[in-house]
Image (spheres, helix red, strand yellow):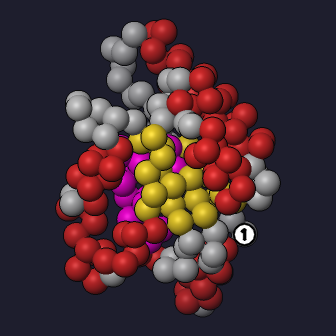
Amino acid sequence: MAGSEYTSVKDFYRDRSIFITGATGFMGKILVEKLLRSCPHIKNIYLLMRPKKGRNVQERLQELLNGPVFENLRRNSPDELSKIIPVAGDITEPELGISIDDQNTLIRTVSIVFHSAATVKFDEALKLSVTINMLGTKRLVQLCNRMHNVEVRKSYR
């Protein structure tokens, strides 16, 4: 019985491209690793990433992939890691700070979106919290509305 559940999840993600915000956070890292480890036929995973502390998104991606969460994939399925594509942007910016070319790629190819970018700091400035948690979500929904292949689901069956 359990095998059929895993098969249906694998089939759901087969040949799909995924867009993830917040992938450098704790839950985001685990999500990316789990998707790549459990669903080997995922086409691509696009990660919204911002340059930070003088490092560009490519450097930040390398740092992410060198972390302990991805050790098993690096050892056993290193080719899976090549499916991860960083998208330069910032959840606090209009249109998520994503270039027109990258927006067009996401609009054409993505069919699944996970939004996990947020500030969870209780002492964060209210204006920044609203920008990240509310406006960032609104901007992501606006992008999703332009995606040709995205479908909205509330749960798996």
Can residue 155 be seen here? Answer: no
Q: Is residue 157 left or right of residue 43?
A: right
Name the residue: 78% across, 41% down: 145
Q: Report which residue position mark 1 lands on.
A: 157
Name the residue: 23% across, 30% down: 53
Rendering coords of residue 108 (x, y %): 72, 56
Rendering coords of residue 81 (x, y %): 37, 69
Rendering coords of residue 150 (x, y %): 74, 55
Name the residue: 28% across, 60% down: 65
Can residue 139 be seen here? Answer: yes
In the picture, residue 84 is in which quadrant?
bottom left
Rendering coords of residue 44 (x, y %): 53, 66
Residue 153 sits above or below residue 88 on the image: below
In this view of the protein, which residue sits in the foreground, 125 or 49? 49
In this view of the protein, which residue sits in the foreground, 117 or 98? 98
Q: Please report the bounds of the magenta region as a residue range.
A: 20-36
- Give the amino acid at mark 1: Arg
In this view of the protein, which residue sits in the foreground, 102 or 48? 102
Q: Please say whether residue 68 is one of the residues in the magenta stretch.
A: no
Neighbour tally class for label 1: few under 14, some 14-19, many 20 plus, Cα within 10 Å? few
Name the residue: 34% across, 35% down: 51
Q: Quadrant of the C terminus?
A: bottom right
In the picture, residue 31 is in which quadrant?
bottom left
Mainly helix, strand or loop, the magenta region? helix
Q: Is residue 38 left or right of residue 145?
A: left
Q: Quadrant of the N terminus?
A: bottom right
Residue 42 sits above or below residue 130 on the image: below
As drawn, the residue found furthest toward the front would be: 101
Q: Please say whether residue 23 is one of the residues in the magenta stretch.
A: yes
In this view of the protein, which residue sits in the foreground, 48 or 67? 48
Secondary structure of the residue carrying tag 1 is loop
Q: Is residue 25 left or right of residue 137?
A: left
